[in-house]
Image (cartoon, rainbow, N blue to C red):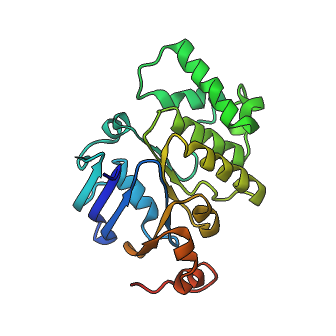
Amino acid sequence: MALLEINDLMVLYGEIEALRGVSLKVDAGQVVTLLGSNGAGKSTTLRAISGLAKPRAGEILFDGRSIMGLGPEAIVRLGISHVPEGRRVFPGLTVKENIMLGASNRRVGKAALSREADAMFDLFPDIRPFADKLGWTLSGGQLQMVAVARGLMAKPRLLLLDEPSLGLAPVIVQAVFRIIAEIRRDTTVLLVEQNARMGLSVADYGYVLETGRLALGGKPDELWGNEAIRAAYLGGHTKAV
């Protein structure tokens, strides 16, 4: 059984169809990547899963249970953590305080919470020296690592990552994706990414969205072998199938 299954999902923004008839699945232990250009519906898909966008129609199943109509807090408690685009780190809190906020869905004592946050620095050693620094002092890459660490503090069964490489220097992108490859050992990941090469480098399966609908899906080598996909990410456009 798929950990996450989406069937015929439709999301409207006013009269605009942000998603129309999208169906996909994510099996436990997988990294699945959603690819597509700006406006394709990638972020809307994650927002619908996490309860931030309300679908007009369709079905979202998590571990066989419908989560349609549930609020974000209830969905987090079920084991879904969403790291949105833009990092959204609190500038007036320290790095460690920001990370600890990720466990707000869990009942954890302060001492245990502090230990768990400290353990995150083993996974994200680049931000360990900044544990007691305020959020506003960090670079974009460091902020992204804090945001992912905060998402992991929820102990999610499914981590939704939205554009983790956006605006980062190539060397930092490599570091972020090394971390994604590491966390997949314990956490299923649904990754939204415009950088097709990086997104597929860590994926077991990929889907391509175009103007709100699913264009195609396949294993990474199958997608790279598809001329339409290669054209889409080398200056052309994906033809719908």
Work out which quarter of the rendered image holds the C terminus and state it.
bottom left
Residue 86: x, y in percent?
A: 57, 51
Q: Is residue 183 visible?
A: yes
Q: How many marks?
A: 0
Q: Nearer the viewer, residue 69 or 207?
A: 207
Horizontal placement of 131 versus 74: left or right? right
Give the residue drawn at x 68%, y 50%: 178
Q: Is residue 91 above or below residue 224?
A: above
Q: Position of residue 74 (x, y in %)?
A: 31, 36
The structure residue drawn at horizontal position 60% and vertical position 26%, both measured from the top left corner, is 117
Expressed as whole percent of the image width and height from the top left, the position of residue 22 reads 32, 68
Q: Is residue 89 visible?
A: no
* Residue 36 screen position, x and y as percent: 50, 71
The answer to which quarter of the image holds residue 93 is: top right
- Residue at the image point whose x is 64% and y is 57% from the top: 165
In the displayed structure image, the side of residue 169 where residue 107 appears, left or right? left
Q: Residue at x 54, y 16 (%)?
A: 112
Quarter-wise, where is residue 229 in the image? bottom right
Q: Is residue 211 left or right of residue 12?
A: right
Q: Nearer the viewer, residue 137 or 75?
A: 75
User: Is 75 located above or below residue 207 in the figure?
Assistant: above
Residue 50 drawn above or below residue 218: above
To which quarter of the image does residue 76 belong? top left
